[in-house]
Amino acid sequence: MIGKARFLLAETGQNIWRNIALTLASILVAAVSLTLFGTSQLVARGVENATQRWEGGIEFVVFMKADAEQSQLDAIEALLEESRGEEINDWDFVSKEETFNEFIEFFAGDEELLDTISVETMPPSFRIQPTDPDAGAVAALGGTFESKPGVRTVVFATEVIREIQTNAEKISQVMLWVGVLLLVASAIVILTTLSIAISSRRNEIEIMKLVGASNWFIRIPFMIEGLLQGVIGALLALPFLAFARQYVIEDFSESDRLRLLEGFRVTDSEFLFISLTAIAIGTAVATVGSILAVSRYLDV
Amino acid sequence: MIRLENVTKEYNPTSPALIDASAEIEKGEFVFLVGASGSGKSTFIRLLNREEKPTSGKVYVAGKDIVGLSSWKVPFLRRNIGCIFQDFRLLPKRTVAENVAFALEVIGRPKHVIDQQVPAILDLVGLSEKSHRMPDELSGGEQQRVSIARAFVNRPLILLADEPTGNLDPDTAVGIMRLLDRINRTGTTVVMATHDRGIVDTMRRRVIELKDGEIVRDQSGGQYR
């Protein structure tokens, strides 16, 4: 058994070495395609996280002071309820606890920051969906809350946010599609690399068949070779994704001019999920390429 | 050991390679297949290790119908059949010993078995001294001996030889035939396609003659004619 495994691995190693340039090309195409795919997902998550509170027609948020009294909250609530069906279509109350939980989720892993906060320091808020989304009307309506007791600030979903939302979505979509196209290219390159590896070894394969090597014994070195190209490509994509997360997306959220995009970041668990998805897709594409190559070019 | 029943093989319908051939070869026999080029000798041989399937008819090897054999079982059939060819088919980048060992490695034999069997078989074919040479450093006769060692190292029941002396001078060919005769005496069935009149007439074994795909003669102790 060990002898068998050693022989198969030696065969695989030889195959890769003889075909090193194409193998590298194959790995790079897989890495680039998975990087694009992963980045598109990172951007999508980032936009989603940054604009979460602006979804579903919510045009402004009334943030209360962290130490606002219950009576002050009740007063705002009463005011909102009064206008429901008129200026206000719907509204939602976000408690201190909910805010705290969102915060923890966002900044998971940032222990230093998390140490400085508690449920008590979180501002409760009202997310408001006006009937009329016109900017002027929204500004006038929101303005009426600014002077109410207990209110810290009112934040509007301005045109800027909407624009960034759509643009980011477009960028993410384009990257996704280019990534998908490159994934197809990657499968084809793996297929071609294997077909060349197979044809350069046709003498060995012929002898193997003749002396009764089992079909799997002949196929396995080529399948491992193809699989490795996808998996190494995916692993290579991971540092690029980490780079994309760190320097592109998070710098975005720290720039002053885009204060409104505070929270444009990707959580650790989201990053882990995207990375695992990239590895899974890389493996799947390589598997498809390998199976196609082996069944097309290796008629055992 | 081998039985063909009314076997026809057509690569294209107008000129069949083998027509309604029937023959039975017993365990331990030595059989020459003779006939002109294109008479169906190679097809006959290729049907025996399932490189080809007949268009109609049955082929039995070691009591088993091999026509209906599912493809994953074919390798196990071939482990019982050694093959040698006119062009040797050695792997040029492996030494003599490695070429022989390859046949055992790819069917998953453990290393200690390989280490023991390869020198033994190289001794049998008379190449112990040259086990670390590369194929291109050997004469044609020596290369054919390596290919016989590779075919026989797994002790198959049957040895198929397609024109094994076709590329060799007469003296060297005699040496190869002595080796095949020795292998035959161990109980291995040998089926050899050949053009070589001298060899057939000297050995006086069973002769199956093919002409245009048909068996026209099946004679024990026969001559080439």
Image: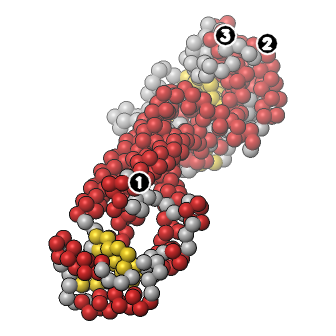
- Vertically, is A169 above or below B54? below
Mark 1 crowdedness (10 Å alpha carbons): few <14, some 14-19, many ≥20: some
Q: Is residue A272 visible?
A: yes
Task: Name the kind of residue labelled 3 in the image.
Answer: Leu
- Residue B179 is situated, as x and y percent measured from the top left of the image, at 73, 19
Please identify, in this view, whether the residue under mark 2 or under mark 1 is nearer the observer. 1
Residue at image location 48% in from the left, 38% down from the top: A27
Q: Which residue is mark 2?
A: B129
Residue at image location 62% in from the left, 11% down from the top: B136
The quarter of the picture where residue B34 lies is top right
Cα–Cα gap, marks 2 and 1: 76 Å
Position of B68 compared to B128: left or right? Answer: left
Task: Name the kind of residue labelled 2 in the image.
Answer: Glu
Q: Which residue is mark 1?
A: A254
Q: Secondary structure at mark 2?
A: helix
**Tag 3 subunit:** B
Q: Secondary structure at mark 3?
A: loop
Do the dots labelled 1 and 3 sit on one chain?
A: no
Q: Which residue is mark 3?
A: B138
Q: Nearer the viewer, residue B30 or A225?
A: A225
- Residue A234 is situated, as x and y percent measured from the top left of the image, at 50, 46
- Vertically, is A71 above or below A281? below
**Tag 2 subunit:** B
Cα–Cα gap, marks 1 and 3: 74 Å
Residue at image location 60% in from the left, 18% down from the top: B92
Position of B79 compared to A187: left or right? Answer: right
Mark 3 crowdedness (10 Å alpha carbons): few <14, some 14-19, many ≥20: some
Give the mark, 2 or 3, whose residue is nearer the N terminus: 2
